[in-house]
Image (tube, rainbow, N blue to C red):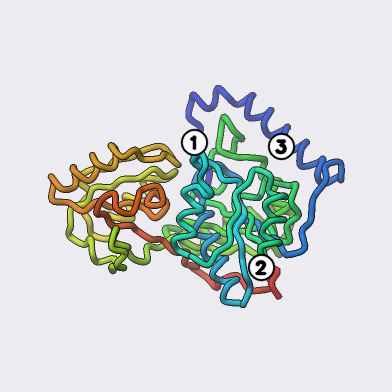
Amino acid sequence: MTAEIHPLRAALWPFGLCYRAASAVRNWAFDAGHKRVHRVSVPVLSVGNLTAGGTGKTPTVLWLCERLRARGERPAVLARGYGRANGARLNDEGEMLQRRLPWLLQEQDPDRVAGAQRLVAAGASVIVLDDGFQHRRLHRDLDIVCMDARMPFSNGQCLPSGDLREGPSGLRRAGLVLLTRAGSLDATQIDARARRIRQLACDDSLPVHACHHAPTDFVSRPDGAVLPLSAIDGRDVVLLTAVARPDSVRSTVEELGANVVADLRHRDHHRFTAAEIEVAARQAKSLGALLVTTEKDDARIPDAACERLVLRIGLRFLDAEPTDQELSLS
C-alpha cells in the first residue's frame, strides 16, 4: 500500500519531517481556534486529498456537481486556480468543467473566502471546494478525501521526501473517503485499505467507497461530435498529454484497443504552444494516426487548432454510491 522511497527523496527526509511538523502545528491552530474559520450562508463540500498529484479530484468534482444538480441544487465550484494563465478566468481544470457543465458557476481565487462570498451572491445554493482539504480558512460541512487505492499514502513521507501534504492523522477531519483507481484491486485488498483508513481516522464508521475512473466516450474536435469508445479500436494513435499520471492515460487508450505509435508528454498543467500542437498534429498525420488527448488537456488547446479526439472519463463506483446522508445532503 506504500511505494518504495527513491534514494534521492530519502535524503530529503529531514525536510519532510519539518513539513509534517509545520502542517501539524497549522492544523492545531485551526482546531484550537487560534486561526479563524470563515463561514458562508450555504453548505460547502470539500474535495481534496492527502497526497500531491493525481488522485482523481476533478472527476469527483464533476460527479458531485451532477449529483447536486439532479437534486435541484445550484452547485458552484470554488478553486484556487493553480496554473491559470495571466488574465484567464479559469485554469485548465476549470475550463474542462465548464465545457462539460455549461450551467456551472465557478470562481477561482487564492482567497477562497472572498471567492465563496461571490458565489453565494451569484446564486449558488451549495459550494464544492476543489482541492480544499488543507485549506482550513473556509468552513466546510463535509470533507471528501480522494485516495489512490493502489498507494493511498504514497511512500509514507511528507513533501519533499514523499507526496504527503500532511500526516495521515489528517484523516480525522474526513467525513467521506473515496478510494479511487480501485479497479485493479479485489474485495479483500479494498477492505484492508478501508480498515486502515478508519483506524488512522479514529472512526470505525467513516464511510469509505471504492471507485475507478472509467472512459465514457470521445469528443471529436473541432466539430464536437460524440464518438463511442470503439472509435480507436485497432487504430494507431499519437498521445498528447500534460497530466500528473500519463501512464494511466496510455494504459486506458491501449485497453481500448489502440496502438500508441507516439507518446508526447509534458509536465502537469503545461500550456501547449501553437508550435507544439502543430508538431503533434503533423506527426499524427504523417503516421496515419489519430491524435488523442485528455479532456483536461483539451481545455488548453484552441477548438480549431487541429483535428483530435478527446477522451472523457467518468467516476464509476465498485460498490454503492455514497448516500445523501453520507454527503450531508439529507
Among the two numbered marks 2 and 3 on one chain, the one whose residue lies closer to the N terminus: 3
Residue type indicated by callout 1: Glu
Q: Position of residue 298 (x, y in %)?
A: 37, 52
Which amino acid does the dot numbered 3 rest on? Ser
Q: Tell me the element at label 1.
A: loop
Q: Is residue 267 above or below residue 201?
A: above
Q: Which of disc 1 and disc 3 is earlier in sequence?
A: 1
- What residue is drawn where x is 56% and y is 61%? 191
Residue at the limit of the structure toward the front, as seen here: 87
Q: Position of residue 178 (x, y in %)?
A: 57, 59
239 or 126: which is nearer to us?
A: 126
83 or 46, which lies in front? 83
| Crowding at mark 1 (Cα within 10 Å: few <14, some 14-19, many 20+) | few
Q: Residue 200: in sight, yes or no? A: no
Marker disc for residue 4: 1
- Element at badge 2? loop
Does residue 67 appear to the left or right of 285 in the view shown?
right
Residue that mark 3 sits on: 23
Residue depicted at 67% across the width and 51% down the height: 115
Q: Residue 103's mark?
A: none
Location of the C terminus (image quadrant): bottom right
| Distance in Å between CA atoms under marks 2 and 1 | 34 Å
Rounded to the nearest angstrom, the CA distance separating label 2 from label 3 is 26 Å
Q: Regarding mark 3 in the picture, which secondary structure is present there?
A: helix
Please give left or right for residue 191 compared with residue 202 in the image: left
Foreground label between 3 and 1:
3
Label 3 Cα crowd, 10 Å radius (few <14 / some 14-19 / many 20+): some
Mark 2 Cα-neighbour bin, 10 Å: few <14, some 14–19, many ≥20: some
In this rendering, the answer to whether 49 lies above or below 5 is below
Identify the mark at residue 327; answer none if there is no mark: 2
Q: Is residue 248 left or right of residue 255?
A: right
Residue type pointed to by label 2:
Leu
